[in-house]
Amino acid sequence: MEQIPKDYIETAEDFFSFMSKEERSKMNKSFSDEQPILYHFFNHMINIIKDKDAREVGFDLYLTIYRSFKYYEVKIPTMTIENIMGITEKTGKLLMDNCDDSSTSNEIFINLKKFMNQDELMDHIHRKMFEMKDGNAILSTPEIWLDVFYEVMNVISILNDESKKHLTKDLN
């Protein structure tokens, strides 16, 4: 499967950066209508994170990722919780197999980047996760970084798997 180009990802991010809160809320509703189980799963998991800035980064990344996967122009049928849980278990195992207590966030990122096969999207996520706000990293602790990173990796894994499945069907 061809990777999502950098300019498409940047356009997806720009699309949301100029929206008001009301417009973003409408877009969230639209994404929720398209994939209600995925949206509510992500929403639930990201809201467990106590840090408000971390949740905001997570939601912004979700919106950009979800819109970026529109690049494939594939209609993905509504996913089931079983499908989503299966892929998140796979992502968790991948994460655990590719990092240990001494791994830096950059090492974890590099190890997972090759599995996702979405280099530009992963680079975009990496930049966003290490952005500064008022001179400080928004995701300031490894725990906060890993919480957001794991949920974002789940969304990429889920959309990657589903897009591949349906792209293959569309080609046949």
Image (spheres, rainbow, N blue to C red):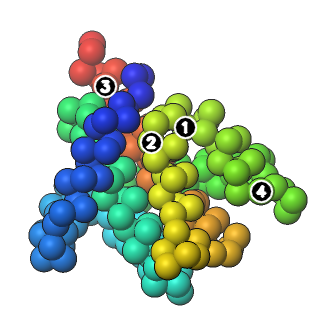
Mark 1 or mark 4: which comes first in sequence?
Answer: 4
Residue at left offset 37%, top offset 68%? 59
Image quadrant of residue 44?
Answer: bottom left
With respect to residue 141, does 110 lie above or below?
above
Residue at left offset 63%, top offset 75%? 140
For the residue marked with disc 3, what is the amino acid?
A: Leu
Q: CA distance from mark 2 to mark 4?
A: 20 Å
Looking at this view, is 107 or 138 the one in front?
A: 138
**Residue at the disc numbered 2:** 121
Mark 2 or mark 4: which comes first in sequence?
Answer: 4
Q: Is residue 86 visible?
A: no
Q: CA distance from mark 1 to mark 2?
A: 9 Å
**Residue at the disc numbered 3:** 167
**Residue at the disc numbered 1:** 116
Crowding at dot 2, Cα within 10 Å, few <14 / some 14-19 / many 20+, comes out as many
Residue at left offset 24%, top offset 21%? 170
